[in-house]
Amino acid sequence: MEVAVYETGERMAEAAAERAAQELSQCIDEKGRATFMAATGVSQLRFLDALTRNAGVDWTRTTMYHLDEYIGLPASHPASFRRYLGEHLIDVVHPGTAHLIDGNAPDPSAECERLGGLLDEDGIDVAFVGIGENAHLGFNDPPADFGTDTLFTVVDLSDTCRAQQVHEGWFRDVGDVPARAITVTIPGILRSRCIISVVPDARKAEAVRCALGGTVAPTCPASVLQTHPRTYVFLDSDSASLLDQQAVSRWRPGAT
Ligand code: GLP
């Protein structure tokens, strides 16, 4: 794992976008195409903005997968992740193929199987993931299932996760936040050859501390990133504020 801390969220986003563009372009050069998985949420906005402004990626040769989506929320709702990805990624760069999660599919388990089959066949080159305030990855809230053999699954959202969505302004009240979602599982995320985790803001500092500085455990889902061979974590000085500075320089000397 490489961890880099930047003075501002803006610089962090630019650096993460640069790395993401390099990874995608390298895959396209090597095998003619690249498959990636996109996260959503406030934490990904500046990163996606910087990435979609990067002129170096041939997006026509990319296939996009979608990390997580609420069940039962119309795609037109302001909090819909399909809408978010449309506005911030798909309608901007037009990936060759975009496999969105249909959170309104009549049978969510069948939707998981459909997407899991496609992902299994395509494989994933690069996964973009945020880390939630409760240290979730995708919508895998604690305690997360590290051992499942499925790639997509239906989950119940925890109260802390639902409260975060209200604080971020996506919903007026916790009762308005859907209780269930479809997410790529932890083993599904780990299957990616490269993971780029973009985690700004002081409200993530505790989650970052447990994810990077603590033991690997389902109670801190993002800690599983420590087990992946090629993960790059991009932090700003606020999200990194509770990390042991010596540990940060061990992960990537001189990155600040
Ligand atoms: C959110 C999203 C994920 C994202 C993560 C962090 O709830 N479902 O796709 O990776 O959790 O995002 P946020 O910026 O909302 O903290």
Image (tube, rainbow, N blue to C red):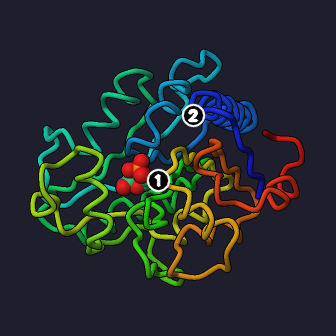
Q: Is residue 15 visible?
A: yes
Q: Nearer the viewer, residue 92 or 132?
A: 132
Residue at the spot of label 2: 9
Q: Is residue 175 left or right of residue 204?
A: left
In this view, 143 is above or below 18? below
In which image quadrant can residue 193 be found? Answer: bottom right
Quadrant of the snapshot with the N terminus: bottom right
Point out residue 236 in the picture as x, y percentages from the top left corner.
62, 41
Label disc, if present, on residue 245 of the rendered structure: none
Point out residue 162 in the picture as x, y percentages from the top left corner.
25, 63
Point out residue 166 in the picture as x, y percentages from the top left corner.
22, 53
Q: Amino acid at mark 1?
A: Arg
- The secondary element bearing badge 1 is classed as helix
Q: Is residue 67 left or right of residue 60?
A: left
Residue at (37% x, 29% y) in the render = 88
Mark 1 vs ligand 1: CB below 8 Å: no
In which image quadrant can residue 182 be found? Answer: bottom left
Q: Nearer the viewer, residue 216 or 80?
A: 216
Between marks 2 and 1, how big is the CA–CA gap?
13 Å
In this view, 146 is above or below 212? below
Residue at the spot of label 1: 203
In which image quadrant can residue 106 be found? Answer: bottom left
